[in-house]
Amino acid sequence: MSKIHAAITAVNGYVPEYVLTNKELEQMVDTNDEWIVSRTGIKERHILKGEGLATSDMAVPAVKGLLEKRGIGAEEIELVIFCTTTPDMPFPATANILSDKIGAVNAWGFDLQAACSGFLYGLTTGAQFIESGRHKKVLVVGGDKMSSIIDYQDRATCIIFGDGCGAVLLEPNTEGFGIIDSVLHSDGSGREHLHMKAGGSLMPASHQTVDNRLHYAYQEGKTVFKFAVSNMADVAAEIMQRNELTADDIAWLVPHQANKRIIDATAHRMGLADEKVMVNIQRYGNTTSGTIPLCLWEWESQLKKGDKLILAAFGGGFTWGATYLKWAY
Ligand code: UT7
């Protein structure tokens, strides 16, 4: 029997209605549209507003739409991997909450936390269950309500992040399409440059942690930028090399959307023209685990069966990686 690959057979996404523009941020912190656009490429981001709404509430419409596209019921899903840095609650897992909300009554699931590389970690993990023959329908969701952990008094971070969620379905493919290879890395010593100080077992929530604004994402932007530029480009080059791919072979780069300058550096290193790079950072900002599936969703109609895609990401942890896949439909 020919090898089983895990192929993406459907993709869908969701971004909340409210649009937070650079102009509005100018009223909140000392910044300006020109600085944000030139330093990051971001013009606006979507924010999930309203009491009682969490990350899973963006996943519900994304996944319901995905199931509809694929023409299957939620009860057919066997495994849910929810990649997120902003789970609804510390426990239970958002995968469980989502499964309940959509009626995935036959699925088991778990959350996967790898910050901005979360979706790539999730895709690689989900693929193992397909390749081994253990499961036939695995849902990989990447979504974050970043606005729940962003300090809107910190101009260096609040301009970057947005809320959004994307999801893909993985199914077995024996015709050579699907996920071919993936290279993943982590380096925990990078945690000092990008983290959230309080709310974990190291520093549980207290009046003091709240007063000191420690429940927000903390980022040393310049340092993270340097690591992101070199590592994302390196890992993209590495996966091309070990699969003997040239720039001409690649139909699309699907990069994590953290900063347009990081995306450009990666594309340049790969020798790719701008037309082959998916970029929507100008409208969504950095949605952390959501960026890559949101790109796939937006570009789905332009993708052709057999297109060779490289997905690449870098994020907190540090975590980074690249995935090579052949589009299956
Ligand atoms: O998604 C996963 C990982 N995260 C990333 O990959 C993000 C990586 N980092 C970045 O994208 C960039 O470092 C930032 C966008 C966060 C910052 O851009 P930068 O070009 O690295 O700016 P900087 O931190 O070096 O700051 C340059 C100047 C500083 O002023 P001085 O010290 O030169 O006077 C900042 O205070 O820009 C100032 N600045 C701002 N000015 C206007 C910082 N934020 C702002 C702002 N508006 N929002």
Image: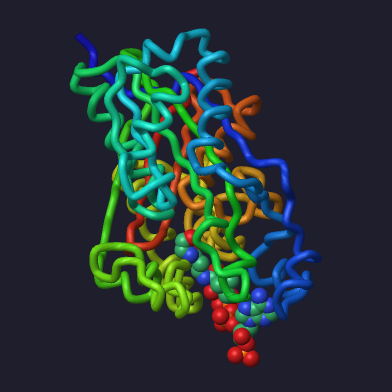
Q: Is 1 drawn above or below residue 46 in the view shown?
A: above
Q: Nearer the viewer, residue 293 or 73?
A: 73
**Residue 225: percent from the left, percent from the top?**
48, 71
**Residue 89: percent from the left, percent from the top?**
39, 47
Q: From the image, which quarter does the N terminus lie in?
A: top left
Q: Is 285 drawn above or below residue 80 in the view shown?
A: below
**Residue 275: percent from the left, percent from the top?**
66, 45
Q: How is the image coloured?
A: rainbow
Q: Residue at x 57, y 39 (%)?
A: 294
Q: Residue at x 52, y 41 (%)?
A: 248
Relative horizontal placement of residue 186, taking residue 117 as reference (left or right): left
Q: Which quadrant of the structure image shows residue 62?
A: top right
Q: Is 121 drawn above or below residue 300 in the view shown?
A: below
**Residue 31: percent from the left, percent from the top?**
72, 77
Q: Residue at x 70, y 70 (%)?
A: 36
Q: Is 271 drawn above or below residue 329 in the view shown?
A: below
Q: Total label count?
A: 0
Relative horizontal placement of residue 151, taking residue 186 as reference (left or right): right
Q: Nearer the viewer, residue 65 or 212?
A: 212
User: Is residue 226 in sight in this rendering?
Assistant: no
Q: Residue at x 47, y 26 (%)?
A: 327
User: Is residue 14 in sight in this rendering?
Assistant: yes
Q: Nearer the viewer, residue 197 or 113?
A: 197
Relative horizontal placement of residue 274, taking residue 62 as reference (left or right): right
- Ligand 1, seen in the image, is in the quarter at bottom right
Q: Residue furthest right?
A: 23
